[in-house]
Image: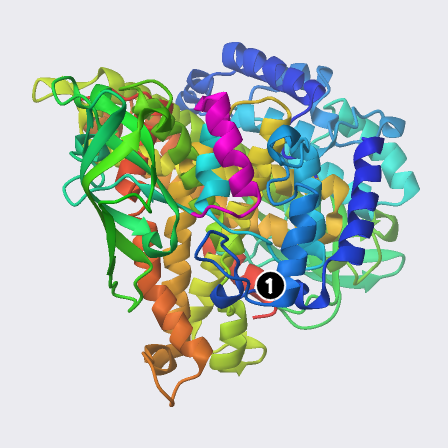
């Protein structure tokens, strides 16, 4: 424990000395650095901050040092997070490589794959996107069709992936592909890494109800992928994917607290947009809804904290399995509440007449609808809880 | 803040589970109900519970207590919530003990706490005067007279009130009804002249009493805390009661939930186990997530009593409010998912449903606590 306190002091000192003032402000999407060959730094300070953190291995603080990670224990990692939060230090590097692929490669990848990809992720050289869903395989992911045929020294990949976030700005994609069409559907799937510069790979953006096009559809037309890009065993990709989905769900359940865009909280919005009488919000229904939301968020935050403590104590609990469902549903509740509080000020789509904050609130409301669909819909999450935790009989 | 139990607390939980499971299962409450037991709980059982130290979990060692703190209390009460065990634990061991601890003089502590710890003396808080929890709505008058006071007025919904040895009467010495100023807590002998107690039988087979106070004289030394400053004692005492009750509600919800999930695994309809139906699976999984959220809130609320009492008002309202909604959801679904058998008196699920409704009213319903939470947060 004493060591941890020392680590905290050292970390605090280092962060104070090394984090530029401009990197201690709330971050907007434009100010995030996602790395990759097509990426660029939003500012000089962002670059300095990124390089200093990278050199300490703190873009991936808990990954092993031989691959460029920080080698911190989970407890130290938490201290670092807390200390960064304390001075509002920005996350120096964003990306699915850090959040999802890296942990999977560290667990399932070959030594060569670790050498090739882990350091490139830590250093921000490669930006990754995820190729899971297909137009015909969303929640029923296992029915995917995108196929990789064994051609001796390489796989020949044909098919398409949908909801590939920012695929047009990524260097690599990790994909689930069908390598055996003749077995039970989960058993013929493999996990493949594909360089998006390879001939035959193309992407088109998809416009969403929020007006944004973060997502793309990605097409593979006779793409030749080297055999060594297979992670884990052939036809055993499902287990790699499942491990990775756990990371994705954890990430999504935590988004509420770390969402970069949400400049306005319902509490702040209430003060700005609602009438008060005798110190109380005059609209009793909105006051009650705001209390409900606040209580829910306090419960969610405490549960995140509890799951961490339980993990540290080596205890198993059901809490982590419900958090994707709980966290994303809470995000939707928040967006609906914000819209209700803003009233007609919350209907601005673009142009003058509305503040940037108001327009953002509406766009995020539309975006929030995706949270309970992406990464396994709420219904799929409930199925999982029913099966894995409650062990209810299956049809 | 600790959101996981330590080794000692887990051991206490095991002990409580074993003891209550064998000595005071739901069947014991059914028996008390069926014979219309005059006390409403098993006095011998309460004595055994006291011998194990449960009556004094939160009482400091110097007053003969176990000094195990609120997390320790929470695990025992939660187990009692699973078995719906009727006992003076909440009213005496938590509310009574807290009132004396927080408001009592050194002399009062020394004379009363050891008796509570040994389970010899029971307490009831005579607070409510309306049919909703309104702790500042006090009309019972305390008029000064010579070296003491005279109490006049009526109290309702006094838990354990019909047979508690001592009543803690919340009365008003000055100010208007609804003022928090001017309240005092008086220790009154349950059988003092002028005290008329009428037992009510409630849905959950527990005891509450209507109490008339007719020119009841008390000495100045029977006041807990300062005259007219009772609110500063009453509020934290109520918050402790709310948090402890939330633990009981957690046990009540968990037990109903587990019994229901087991039923889904064995009951067949339309030729299949009903647990295979997605509509039931989703509702069960939703309850699981609500249980998880409530679990975290409860642990934090319990530990805030001992570790950060400044957070207690917010945490108590959060815990009571969320647990109110949890037991309502889970007990309603439990009855519904059990189908026809769920509404029979034979099945114990109905006992949980009824206890949940009582617990939801005690020390404040959801509306009360949501309002308080919003006010405490400045909106």
Q: Which residue lies most toward the bottom here? A: A353
Secondary structure of the residue carrying tag 1 is: loop
The quadrant the N terminus of chain A occupies is top right
Residue B207 among magenta residues: no
Residue B342 picture quarter:
top left
Query: At which x and y percent is residue A258?
Result: 53, 54
Tell me the chief SS of the magenta region: helix
Residue B327 picture quarter:
top left
* Residue B364 in sight from this viewpoint: no
Q: Residues within 10 Å of mark 1 (few under 14, many from 20)?
A: many
Pinpoint the chain carrying mark 1: B
Query: At which x and y percent is residue B39?
Result: 56, 26
**Numbered disc total:** 1
**Observer-nearest of B352 and A14:** A14
Residue A120 among magenta residues: yes
Q: Which residues are magenta?
A: A106-127
**Observer-nearest of B336 and A7:** A7
| Left or right: residue B25 compared with residue B17 | left
Residue B326 sits above or below residue A88 on the image: above
* Residue B291 in sight from this viewpoint: yes
| Left or right: residue B139 compared with residue B142 | left
């Amino acid at each position: 424990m004493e060591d941890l306190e020392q680590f905290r002091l050292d970390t605090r000192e280092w962060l104070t000395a090394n984090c530029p003032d401009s990197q201690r402000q709330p971050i907007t999407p434009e100010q995030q650095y996602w790395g990759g060959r097509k990426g660029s730094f939003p500012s000089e300070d962002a670059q300095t901050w990124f390089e200093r953190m990278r050199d300490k291995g703190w873009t991936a603080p808990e990954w092993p040092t031989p691959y460029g990670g920080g080698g911190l224990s989970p407890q130290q990692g938490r201290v670092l997070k807390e200390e960064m939060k304390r001075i509002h230090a920005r996350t120096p590097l964003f990306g699915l490589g850090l959040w999802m692929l890296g942990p999977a490669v560290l667990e399932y990848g070959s030594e060569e794959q670790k050498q090739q990809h882990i350091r490139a992720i830590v250093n921000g050289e490669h930006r990754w996107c995820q190729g899971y869903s297909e137009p015909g395989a969303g929640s029923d992911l296992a029915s995917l069709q995108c196929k990789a045929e064994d051609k001796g020294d390489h796989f020949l990949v044909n098919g398409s992936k949908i909801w590939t976030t920012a695929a047009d700005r990524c260097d690599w994609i990790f994909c689930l592909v069908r390598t055996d069409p003749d077995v039970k559907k989960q058993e013929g799937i493999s996990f493949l890494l594909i360089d998006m510069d390879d001939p035959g790979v193309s992407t088109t953006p998809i416009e969403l109800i929020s007006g944004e096009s973060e997502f793309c559809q990605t097409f593979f037309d006779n793409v030749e992928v080297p055999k060594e890009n297979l992670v884990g065993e052939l036809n055993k990709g499902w287990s790699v994917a499942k491990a990775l989905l756990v990371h994705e769900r954890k990430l999504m359940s935590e988004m509420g607290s770390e969402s970069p865009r949400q400049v306005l909280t319902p509490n702040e919005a209430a003060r700005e947009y609602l009438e008060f009488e005798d110190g109380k919000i005059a609209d009793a229904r909105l006051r009650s809804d705001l209390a409900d939301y606040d209580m829910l968020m306090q419960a969610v935050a405490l549960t995140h904290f509890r799951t961490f403590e339980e993990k540290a104590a080596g205890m198993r609990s059901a809490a982590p399995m419900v958090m994707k469902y709980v966290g994303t549903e809470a995000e939707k509740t928040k967006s609906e509440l914000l819209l209700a509080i803003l009233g007609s000020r919350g209907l601005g789509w673009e142009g003058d007449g509305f503040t940037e904050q108001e327009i953002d609130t509406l766009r995020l409301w539309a975006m929030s609808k995706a949270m309970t669909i992406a990464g396994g819909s709420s219904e799929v999450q409930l199925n999982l809880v029913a099966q894995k935790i409650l062990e209810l009989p299956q049809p | 803040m600790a959101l996981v139990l330590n080794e000692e607390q887990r051991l206490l939980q095991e002990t409580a589970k074993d003891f209550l499971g064998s000595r005071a299962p739901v069947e014991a409450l059914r028996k008390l109900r069926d014979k219309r037991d005059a006390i409403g709980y098993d006095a011998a059982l309460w004595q055994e519970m006291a011998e194990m130290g449960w009556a004094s979990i939160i009482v400091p060692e110097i007053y003969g207590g176990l000094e195990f703190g609120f997390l320790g209390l929470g695990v025992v009460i939660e187990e009692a919530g699973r078995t719906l065990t009727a006992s003076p634990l909440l009213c005496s061991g938590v509310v009574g003990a807290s009132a004396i601890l927080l408001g009592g003089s050194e002399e009062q502590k020394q004379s009363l706490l050891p008796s509570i710890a040994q389970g010899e003396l029971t307490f009831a808080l005579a607070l409510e005067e309306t049919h909703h929890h309104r702790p500042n709505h006090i009309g019972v008058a305390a008029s000064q007279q010579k070296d003491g006071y005279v109490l006049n007025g009526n109290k309702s919904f006094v838990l354990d009130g019909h047979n508690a040895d001592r009543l803690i009467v919340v009365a008003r010495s000055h100010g208007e009804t609804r003022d928090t100023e001017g309240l005092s807590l008086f220790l009154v002998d349950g059988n003092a002249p002028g005290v008329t107690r009428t037992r009510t039988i409630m849905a959950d087979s527990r005891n509450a009493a209507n109490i008339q106070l007719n020119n009841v004289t008390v000495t100045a030394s029977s006041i807990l805390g300062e005259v007219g400053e009772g609110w500063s004692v009453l509020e934290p005492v109520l918050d402790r009661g709310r948090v402890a009750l939330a633990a009981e509600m957690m046990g009540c919800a968990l037990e109903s939930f587990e019994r229901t999930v087991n039923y889904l695994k064995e009951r067949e309809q339309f030729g299949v186990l009903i647990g295979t139906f997605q509509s039931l699976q989703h509702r069960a999984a939703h309850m699981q997530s609500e249980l998880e959220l409530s679990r975290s809130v409860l642990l934090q609320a319990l530990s805030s009593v001992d570790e950060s009492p400044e957070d207690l008002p917010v945490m108590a309202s959060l815990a009571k409010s969320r647990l109110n909604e949890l037991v309502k959801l889970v007990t309603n679904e439990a009855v519904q998912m059990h189908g026809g058998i769920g509404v029979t008196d034979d099945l114990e699920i109905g006992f949980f449903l009824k206890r949940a409704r009582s617990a939801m009213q005690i020390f404040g319903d959801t509306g009360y606590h949501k309002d308080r939470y919003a006010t405490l947060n400045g909106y």
